Image (cartoon, grey):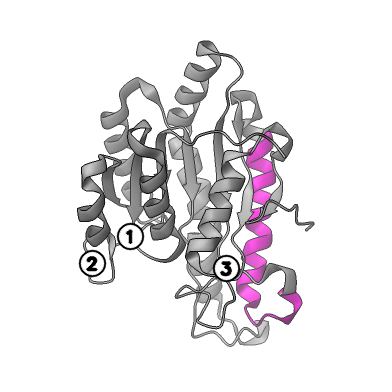
Amino acid sequence: ANMPVELKGNILVTGANRGLGLELVKQLAETTGQEAHIYACSREPEGSRTEFFDIQKTLVIMMCISMHLPVDVADEESISAAVQAVQDQIGDAGLNILINNAGIRKPALSGALSATKKNDMMEVYETNVVGPFTIAKMFLPLLKKAAQRDSSAKGSGMYLFFHVMLNVGYHHWEKTQWSEYILMVSSLNMLTRCQAEDFKTHNIVVTAIHPGWVQTEMGGENAPLTTVDSVLGMLSVISSLSNKDRGMLLDWQGNTIPW
C-alpha cells in the first residue's frame, strides 16, 4: 500500500445533498481542517430534500465548505456556471480533487431489459455517464492548473481526479435486477479508462471507486454497509492513490475489482 497523503487543496464533490455525497463532504470537512476548501454541488441545494445546510451550520466555523453550488450534471449551462463560480473563488490555485458522485437510478423500473423504456435508459445514462464526462471535461482547465502548480512546486506530488461509483452490488451484478444500471456502470468504467489515458499527459490520475452496497436512498435499508464506513474507506483509498491506479476500478477497501 502507498503511504496515505493528507487530502487538502480545493476539493469538489457532486451529488452532495444526500447519501454518500453528503457523508463525503461531512468527513472531508471534519478531517481536512483549514488546509482544504470544499465545493459541494447538488441539483437541489435549497430544495426540501437537502440536509446540507444543517451540517453547514455546524461546520461553518471550520471554514472548510467554501461554496454549495446548484449543479444539474445533465445540464451544461448549470455546470458552466459552477466552473465559473469555483474559478472566481480559487483563482490560479486550480482544483486538486474532483469526486464525481452524482447519480440516479429509476426505482420504478422492474430491471428486466425487455421492460425498460428507452427514455428511462437515456435518463440514467445521461446523468450517470454523460454527467461525469461533462463535469470532467469542463473542470479540466482547473484540474490542469493544480497539477501544473504542483509539478512545478515540488515535482513529486500528485493531484487526483477520480469517479466514485454508486451503490452497485457490483460483485453480485448477475443477481441484481437493475439491468439499465449495470449497463451504465460498464460505460462509466470504460469512461474512466479512456479519461485516465486522456488525462495522463496532464499528470491527473483518474480512478473509479466502488463504494460497496450502502444504506442510502439508492442502496436501500437492507444494504450491509453504512455511509460512514463506506466513506471512511473511500477517503483512505483516495489518499493512497498513485499512478499505478490510473484507470483502475477499486472498491472502498482498496481492492482491485476486475471488470
Q: What element carries label 2?
A: loop
Range drawn in magenta: 173-197
Q: Do the residues labelled 1 and 2 touch (CB within 8 Å)?
A: yes
x, y (%) of residue 228?
48, 62
Indicate the amino acid at tag 2: Gly
Mark 3, secondary structure of its residue: loop
Tag 2 residue? 47
Few, some or many residues within 10 Å of mark 3 (<14, 14–19, 20+): many
**Badge 3 vs badge 1, beta-carbon distance below 8 Å:** no
Asked whether residue 164 is in view, the answer is: no
Q: Where is 90 relative to 73, above or below?
A: above
| Whether residue 180 is visible | yes
Badge 1 is on which residue?
A: 43
Per the model, the C-alpha gap separating discs 3 and 1 is 19 Å
Q: Residue 191 lies in magenta, yes or no? A: yes
Q: Name the residue under label 3.
A: 167
The residue mark sitting in front, 3 or 2, is: 3
Task: Name the kind of residue labelled 3 in the image.
Answer: Asn
Residue at 75% in and 52% down = 256
Instruction: Name the residue at 25% across, 39% down.
Output: 63
Question: Upstream in the sequence, badge 3 or badge 2?
Answer: 2
